Image: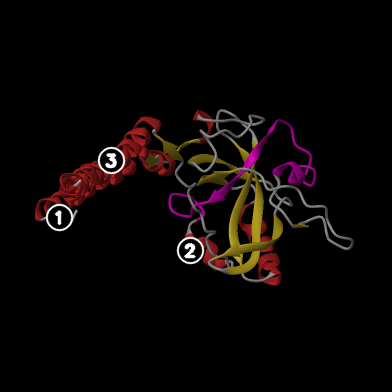
Amino acid sequence: MRKPKWIGALLLALVVAGVFAWLGQWQLSFAITLEDENAAVVEEVRPLVEVTGPGQAITDASAGFVFSTRGEFVADDFMVIESRANGGETGAWVVGHLATTDAAAGHLSVALGWAPSLAEAETARFELQDSLAGEPVEIVGRYMPSDAPVKPEPGDTADRLQSMAPAQLVNLWQPFIGASYPGFLVLHPDGSSIDTTALSTVGLDAIDSVPPLPVETINWLNLFYALEWVVFAGFAVFFWYRLARDDWEKTHELQLMGEQEPLSQDR
């Protein structure tokens, strides 16, 4: 097996195996992909009523997408949501009740802005209540599914909650007619009547709005091809081993036969 021809054959087998391994890795890169082609669609601003409406369940076609709507905020329905992270810090959201005036005419929870403390959020809540209530506004934001409702602790006020759950909020709003949205909108100041300047005036920052992660998909055919290339790479080395082993065994047998012939002649 140490013959020059078999050493050369080993090098050739390793090169072939390396090529097959590279082809397997290349094929594998197409086997698992992210559906990031929908990223542009997720960020494209579309009217909310074109995709969903009041009382309609949140689906993959609406959750995490950016939509626009219009309406008026209802006085006395501005509230504070505690324990909200933003930019790595924990503070509170100020949220409002938007009575939409589009074709759906529903009731939508809107997360307006973030404050670093409860006291600042409370101050901003009252200032927004005075400036926004009853005023027609255009809103752009990301439509998000509800948090799980959290039971209020003893001593908590009705306008200060622990979770962003529209089903819980509607029970605290002023009486209204019509259906409500099961999800909520995270305000995007760009494109909205309530811009960054309006938020900063009352001491609020824009809320971090993160698009949903792209979905991983597996192409089983490409995965099978990748495994085939790995098998071929292993077979290239195994093929060299069997040929070299057969040659060694044949040479060894000839040597034994050569050693046995003089013994038979002596007899």
Residue that badge 1 annotates: 7
Residue 185 on the magenta segment:
yes
Q: Secondary structure at mark 1?
A: helix
Q: Nearer the observer, disc 3 or disc 1?
A: 1
**180 w.r.t. 234: above or below:** above
The C terminus - image quarter: top left
Q: Any mark on residue 197, and which?
A: 2
Amino acid on which disc 3 is placed: Phe
Magenta-colored span: 166-194
Q: Position of residue 212 (x, y in %)?
A: 49, 46
Q: Nearer the observer, disc 2 or disc 3?
A: 3
**160 w.r.t. 213: above or below:** below
Q: Nearer the observer, disc 2 or disc 1?
A: 1
Amino acid on which disc 1 is placed: Ile
Q: Secondary structure at mark 3?
A: helix
Distance, label 2 to label 3, CA atoms, is: 67 Å
